């Protein structure tokens, strides 16, 4: 059914190649970004939602009396 419609489009064979290229470049860039990411920043973000006592979700440290 769709074959007839796609036969009418000029240079339709280039679109799958463009789509695959965009997909590949995006995920390759994402992998490079993750590998080069600062490990200290990742550790800081990982521990951000939990306070020192481990049972609250507050990110603000308060002084205890």
Image (cartoon, helix red, strand yellow):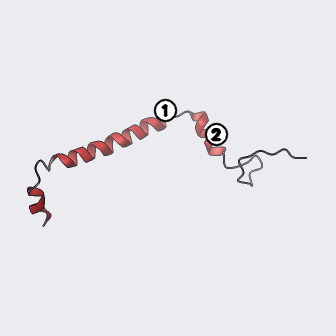
Label 2: element kind: helix
**Count of picture labels:** 2
Residue 23 relative to residue 64: left or right: left
In the rendered image, residue 18, in percent from the top left (x then y), is placed at 23, 44
Q: Quadrant location of the N terminus? A: bottom left
In the rendered image, residue 56, in percent from the top left (x then y), is placed at 74, 54
- Indicate whether 16 appears above or below 34: below
Residue placed furthest toward the right: 65
Label 1: element kind: helix
Disc 1 versus disc 2: distance between alpha carbons?
16 Å
The disc placed on residue 11 is none
Q: Which quadrant holds residue 23?
A: top left
Residue identified by numbered label 2: 44
For the point 17% across and 45% down, the residue is 14
For the point 73% across and 48% down, the residue is 51
In the rendered image, residue 20, in percent from the top left (x then y), is placed at 27, 46
In the rendered image, residue 12, in percent from the top left (x then y), is placed at 14, 50
Marks 1 and 2 close (CB-CB < 8 Å): no
Viewer-proximal residue among 9 and 57: 9
Residue 11 relative to residue 34: left or right: left
Mark 1 neighbour class, 10 Å CA radius: few under 14, some 14 to 19, many 20 or more = few
Work out whether mark 1 precedes mark 2 in sequence or the reverse, and give the earlier one.
1
Viewer-proximal residue among 34 and 59: 59
Viewer-proximal residue among 14 and 44: 14
Residue identified by numbered label 1: 36
């Amino acid at each position: 059914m769709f074959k007839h419609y796609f036969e009418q489009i000029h240079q339709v064979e280039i679109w799958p190649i463009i789509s695959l290229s965009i997909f590949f470049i995006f995920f390759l860039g994402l992998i490079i970004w993750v590998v080069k990411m600062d490990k200290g920043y990742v550790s800081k973000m990982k521990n951000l939602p939990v306070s020192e006592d481990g049972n609250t979700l507050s990110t603000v440290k308060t002084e205890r009396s």
